[in-house]
Amino acid sequence: MTWSNWAGNQVMEPARVLRPTTVDEIAAAVKQAAADGLTVKPIGSGHSFTAIGLTDGVLLDLSGYDRLLSADAGTGLVTVEAGLTLHRLNALLHEHGLGLTNMGDVDAQTVSGAVSTGTHGTGRDSAGFAAQIAGLEIVLADGSVVQCSRTERPELFDVARVGLGALGVLSTVTFQAEKAFTLVADERPMPLDEVLDGFFDLVRDNEHFEFYWFPHTEVALTKRNNRTDEPVSPLSKARAFVDDELLSNGLFELTCRLGNRMPAIIPKLNRAASTALTARTYRDVAPKVFVSSRRVRFREMEYAIPRAELPAVFAELRTLPERIGEPVSFPVEVRVAPPDDVPLSTGSGRESAYVAVHMYKGTPYDRYFTAVERLFQQVEGRPHWGKLHTLDASVLRTRYPRFDDFVAVRNRVDPERRFGNAYLERVLGG
């Protein structure tokens, strides 16, 4: 079997593919792999752009391991099997009157993949998935099944909330959810200079703020999402279709293809797209506001930088495509997160601004991403574990004060590197 990820830039041919549906089957697969001298990697929806999930050993397809195990509306504690997709998780939570405090704008990932790579959304006060985890069940390298939380195996829990798939196979995840809530979404174009000048005020004044900027233009699309007690008032089906399906996916796909064939016209296409941006306001349940439809395929690099550095970094980034002679069709995305206490979370111990750059699938990206990464390195940026970057353990150790805490736990629970691969060897060391 040949497997490739969503973006098509990672490919593997594992020796065996297993599709466990119980934790006992996962444990048996790990034990058998050890007996056969093979590595083991679980795989979800393939939405990571890095080689974090690749193996030439045993591939565990968790798509059949996807049940809701418990949901307590009183405490908000929800336990799910790790192969469950975020899309289905949101639907199940809604059925129980619950919702996650924050999430990213894509819901195709599995719980396992989202947790393991440090997936996040944007939030003034609310961090990513790692901050919403109350407990984990993990199958370790010896096939044992262990539970961990802040009170049970706390050292393992501490690091496993963003575990990179290096510690074991996540079998279940317990989230601390809350009562379902409604967000009012205010989306509008603004002059880029105005957004950058008022960036810290926009972050302060909104629970969830982000903006998108099309290179070669002076316009940004801003998104403000805030809680409301008013009843839902979603976009009409016609407006949602035109904005989110016809323009953001259908027409955008066509312009990306055109730009791929004729790169010189990309700046004109972007300027035309920026003039088509219009304001809209609506109210809906949180997942329908957080999540956007993303069908145009791309490659992505995202770094977390100290939030105070964002204006200076963006001042350089906005002129970068012209300076290196590289037309860029895809927008740059900027989000924020508060500090958290997870050792390998990109938000560990500092307020972050997240800057993500993209290139349309099939477009050479090395030159642009290399230049962008060099800029992020000047401010000690931390790369998203599931998105393209070139850093190795020697550099990452300097970016994460508790890097060696993670490595120490890994050495204890997987000394033979049963869950290792080339990517993990690069970013964590041997």
Image (cartoon, helix red, strand yellow):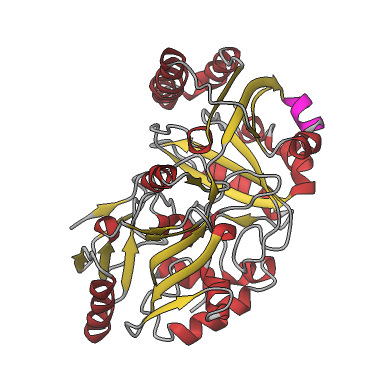
324 part of magenta stretch: no
Q: Position of residue 201 (x, y in %)?
A: 81, 35
Looking at the image, can residue 162 be seen?
no
Q: Eyeballing the image, is 219 above or below 121?
A: above
Displayed quadrant of residue 210: top right
Most common secondary structure along the magenta stretch: helix
Left or right of 263: which side holds 320?
Answer: right
195 part of magenta stretch: yes
Pick the front one: 82 or 276: 82
Pick the front one: 428 or 189: 189
For the point 74% across and 38% down, which residue is it? 203
Left or right of 418: which side holds 162?
Answer: right
Left or right of 345: which side holds 379?
Answer: right
Total numbered labels placed on residues in the image: 0
Displayed quadrant of residue 155: bottom right
Pick the front one: 5 or 362: 5
For the point 56% across and 45% down, which residue is it? 369
For the point 32% across and 82% down, which residue is it? 143
Identify the image quadrant of the N terminus: bottom left
Displayed quadrant of residue 230: top right
Q: Eyeballing the image, is 293 above or below 392?
A: above
Magenta stretch: give its range. 192-197
Q: Position of residue 92 (x, y in %)?
A: 38, 46
Pick the front one: 245 or 382: 245
Q: Eyeballing the image, is 141 above or below 334?
A: below
Residue sitting farthest toward the front:
74
Q: Position of residue 14 (x, y in %)?
A: 23, 65
Q: Position of residue 329 (x, y in %)?
A: 52, 28
Looking at the image, can residue 129 be seen?
yes
